[in-house]
Image (cartoon, coloured by chain):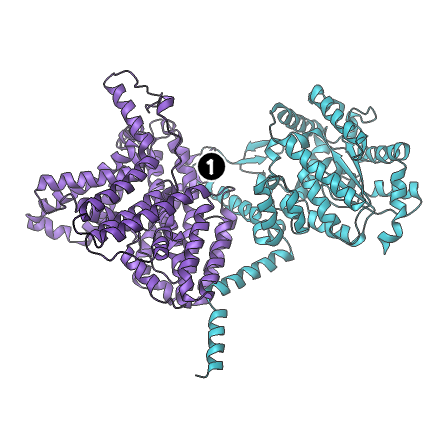
Chain colours: A purple, B cyan
Amino acid sequence: MLFNSFSYMLFLPVVVLLFWRVPNKYRPILLLVASYVFYSAWNPIYLLLIVGMTLVNWVFGLLIAPAVQLRKPLLVAAIVFNLATLCYYKYVNFIFSSIVELFHLVQLPGGSITGNGTAQLPEAWHLNVILPLGISFFTFEFLHYIVEVFKGGQAVKDPIKFAVFAAFFPTQIAGPIKRYEDFIAQLELPSVFCIADLEKGFVMVLHGLAKKVLLADNLAIYVNHIYGAPGAATNLDLWLATYAFAFQVYCDFSGYTDVAIGSALMLGLKVPPNFNVPYMASSIRELWHRQHISLSNWFRDYVYFSLGGSRCSRGRVYVNLLITTALAGLWHGAAWHHVMWGLFQGLSLIVNREWMRFYENIAWLKKFVQSKLWTIIAIFITFHAFCLSYVFFRADTNAIALHILGRMLRLWYAAPHGRPLFLSTQGPLITPLIPFIIAALVLAHILSEFLRRNAFWSKTPRPLQAIYCAFLIFMMITLMPDEANRFIYFQF
Amino acid sequence: MSGFQNAVSKAFRAFTSVPVLTLLVLLGCELWLRQGNPMDAIGIRNVDSWDIVSRINVSRKVCPQVALIGSSLMLVLNQDEHGSHFYTGYDPSYLGALFNRVTGKEIRCVNLSTGLQMVSEAYMVTEAACNNDCYPKVIIYGVSMRDFIQDALAAEWHTDSFNSVAPLAPISARENVFSKQGADEFLASHFFYIYRNRTDFKNFFSVLAKNFIETLPVDFYFPRLGPDHKWHQLKEGFLFEQWIPRKQEKFAEQMYQAHPEVLRDYYKTFQIMIYRNQYKQAPEVSNHYLAKLVQLCRRKGIVLVLVNMPLSPDTSKVVPAAQMDGFRQFLHASEKAGNFYLIDLWGDAAFKDSDYKDGVHLNFSGAKKLADKIVGQLQERYPAVFDSLTAGEKHALQ
């Protein structure tokens, strides 16, 4: 079920109403049934997968907690089980394709490559695997649970509550990746209805949907127009499309997160935040503390720290960073251009660390770096570095991404083929409006930080909030596309 | 605080909560939109540009014995000699007078045709018109082969009046909607004018955006209908979003008086474009709705008369002959199966090029000829239709 569908608009109020009507002890059961209904709406057969994985991980948790000698083997078995399931559904065809590409590279028989440079898998090698919705997210939640229980955390004894943790419908498909201690603790306590939370959740759901329907989906029209045929676009268009893509991803995913957090809040449950105005970050390190926070924390806790984190030699730290970010890239998509995107993040983090080391020893530079002017410059540089990395994320292959990047970096040659496409009335109507929309989004980004700091929304009278919400609904109905677009992060 | 005060306070807080207030604001918008179409008032193309809702309401009020459905080819029966009501109005007065003369009684006719009305719309308009205690006894449906092959309009919600009549049709009509998306669209439009009217506001924003964009150094202006009745990249003229029937009617009459050849060329090109495209889903969709229309008429005891509409001899040349033969065979076979009465006017020599305003739509004298033909053929081949008209007259008048 998509959040931006009529079904969800009916599903959520019904679940919220039932949740607050049934006695406390039955609420986890209700949540579980609702979550499984939500998942079944996509493909009922895959319900078996999530139920099966839940059952296996619950048993692993119960076995690991009291185990002494078998503690480590059980942990390894649980990790292998989860990773193998994820690899089978998400990476098996990617692994085979990579082998074929490798064969082609070293000129061994069997390596066949298509016109656009991607591997042509032999028929026998191609597995018709459908990527189950949300598998990357709930697998990471299971891994987190297993590792925490291994470290001494309490295993969840109640299978219903554990199943709700894994399948909770607001976060089931695209996170935020929850921490079991926080979530289960909330399920243990009797939930008390709070109208302020319901209102806050309602507004967040609408806000999230508006980000998706009004902004992300409309920006996607221009992004697809340019990235669909980058050769026909001028360098200026490529920059604009890349800015637009950065905001598309932000609006799409933070929109999804807002709906998820808002839906949970309407049920009296709190899930971790995932975004905090990321493009206002003044370093790439800070950006990853503001963007997809739950995933960044997961990779930090379970990959980076496991590799040794920052408590080793400088070279080793950088290797750790590169491994972590490359895996984060691979998590985003089973393709080499996603790995490149991850490596770009790793390199950016290394450059950031080196820069910090560099100015630490120069007094005047250190003073300048602490000034407001530098903060503005740093925000500008960070945003642009991140935008450049997004070229790898959006392009179909690394070769196309490098071609686009090469052209974008020739700043002195903005429109070599004549008029920029964004100044044309021949394409989608949104095209000439793109510079204004991006400017408005930058402004909104700056303003939202200010408004959040000043608790603007909570001070706004309820009738005004209602008018704003009604306006959002009206605009979404008016400007929504004919067919509902999936959220970008659903594919992960 | 006492228990009662506490309960009142809680109820007040709930009633003034943001979700409830939001619903109230939306309810206000819904009621406002049900009062009339604000976008139509400012000349924006909208869900009810063809004014079909008020015409159905007229039909429900006057309980006509005869209703006309179909595209603008039937709408021209409303026109007068000055070109008024070429695309607007609801009263085919000349046809009504003919029925009065033949039956010797007052026969009320209402024209429920709309521009480019597809079979899906014709079905839904009939559902809406019949969703009343009294309803037409005879429905005369002007069809053309184009309605059965236009893939671009096969999707119900892409048509001009499917969504607009949804609130007036019974909810049970949803079961007969061909596609799932069409059924969802019908459901949403049936209950919510805010949803039904969304294209109006989309067009409004589109006009604003286009006017703003043209202040930028863009390569071309947006297409507008120029004085030669062709779409050009012009600064002046009608944007598509502003091209509404009452403007079309005025513009077409001026053009007819000054340069009729321009109108003819435009529509001929349009016909060529229609028949050049390969079709895929449209026949299946249209046949589905024709069958549903036949079922509806049977259930309600309505006599359904199909008129295969003529084009001018000159424009007819661009219609693929073999394709048209197949279409006519289909219509005649359906007639033999007892689905409807058929008046096949395709290629009728009575209709000359001079009877058309633009090669497709009949002018005032041509429309009179069409009315004569319809009534004449009914008298000659299906006199029982007149019995149906007069037999239930008292019931209709009650």
Relative to A13, is B270 above or below?
A: above
Q: Residue type at mark 1: give it.
A: Pro
User: Is residue B155 or residue A89 the one in the foreground?
Assistant: A89
Query: Going by the image, does B111 lie left or right of A133?
Result: right
User: Is residue B221 or residue A235 the one in the foreground?
Assistant: A235
Query: Going by the image, does A314 lie left or right of A238?
Result: left
Query: Can residue B48 be seen by looking at this rendering?
Result: no
Q: Looking at the figure, which quarter contains the C terminus of chain A?
A: top left
Q: Where's residue A237, x and y in %?
A: 36, 34
Q: What subunit carries mark 1?
A: A
User: Is residue A463 or residue A492 the one in the foreground?
Assistant: A492
Relative to A173, is B357 above or below?
A: above
**Residue pictured at 69% horizontal, 21% vertical:** B320
Q: Where's residue A470, x and y in %?
A: 49, 58
Query: Going by the image, does A275 lie left or right of A259?
Result: left
Which residue in the protein does label 1 denote?
Answer: A428
Q: Where's residue A343, x and y in %?
A: 22, 36
**Residue pictured at 77% horizontal, 42% vertical:** B297
User: Is residue B268 or residue A335 the one in the foreground?
Assistant: A335
Q: Where's residue B23, x and y in %?
A: 52, 61
